[in-house]
Amino acid sequence: MLRLGIPVLGVTDLERAAAFWSAALDLVPTGEWQNENWRTLSHRDGSGPALGLLRSESPAEHHPRLHLDLFVESADEQRTEVQRLLALGAKDPHWDSYPREPDFVVLADPDDNVFCVVDLSHAPSS
């Protein structure tokens, strides 16, 4: 039976990406399928893989069709997490497509892959 695996991000610097996403999401690099072009990051509690990182030569898309949404429970937690992620090396991509009352903040990882920090108490955006 087919089942969904893990999201995979294309990155130019595997070590930098592994460090950022490990710190951002409290993940740990694991021995599953590691090589010079791949890193698997797993949940710290041992419950399995969470994110794959694949070496890529192509640049990140500014408006990708697929991206990660990271959830928080409140606007205060959203502000705190956005500041923490920026301190870890996330970037502000100056998103030009926010709705009138967004429930999300768009950031980019050190490889310019955009992702959202979504305030579930305010969702959905209007």
Image (tube, rainbow, N blue to C red):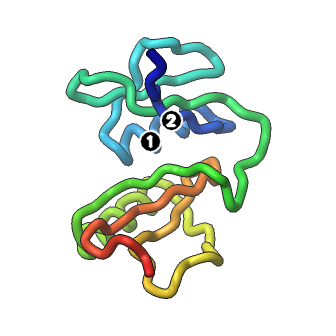
Say which label, 2 or 1, has the lower sequence index: 2
Residue 9: x, y in percent? 58, 38
Q: Which of the pair 20/1 is nearer the observer?
A: 1
| Vertical arrangement, residue 34 with respect to residue 98, above or below | above
> Where, by quadrant of the figure, is residue 117 drawn?
bottom left
Question: What is the three-letter code of the residue carrying label 1?
Answer: Trp
| Vertical arrangement, residue 14 with respect to residue 31, above or below | below
User: Which residue, given by chain and number where applicable, does mark 1 sit on?
Assistant: 21
Q: Which of the pair 14/64 is nearer the observer?
A: 64
> Where, by quadrant of the figure, is residue 119 drawn?
bottom left
In this view, which residue lies farthest toward the front?
1
Q: Which of the pair 20/44 is nearer the observer?
A: 44
Which residue appears at 51% of the width and 56% of the height? Answer: 115
Q: Which of the pair 87/37 is nearer the observer?
A: 37
| Vertical arrangement, residue 40 with respect to residue 110, above or below | above
Residue 93: x, y in percent? 61, 67
Residue 78 relative to residue 89: left or right: left
Which residue appears at 52% of the width and 14% of the height? Answer: 34
Q: Is label 2 or label 1 in front?
A: 2
Report crowding for label 2: few under 14, some 14 to 19, many 20 or more residues within 10 A (C-alpha): few
Residue 61 relative to residue 16: left or right: right
Residue 69 relative to residue 112: left or right: left
Which type of secondary structure does the marked residue at label 2 adopt?
loop
Structural distance between the alpha carbons of marks 2 and 1? 12 Å
Which type of secondary structure does the marked residue at label 1 adopt?
helix
The label number, if any, that marks residue 108 in the structure image: none
Report crowding for label 1: few under 14, some 14 to 19, many 20 or more residues within 10 A (C-alpha): many
Which residue appears at 44% of the width and 81% of the height? Answer: 126
Residue 73: x, y in percent? 23, 64
Which residue appears at 50% of the width and 87% of the height? Answer: 100
Residue 61: x, y in percent? 72, 54
The label number, if any, that marks residue 7 in the structure image: 2
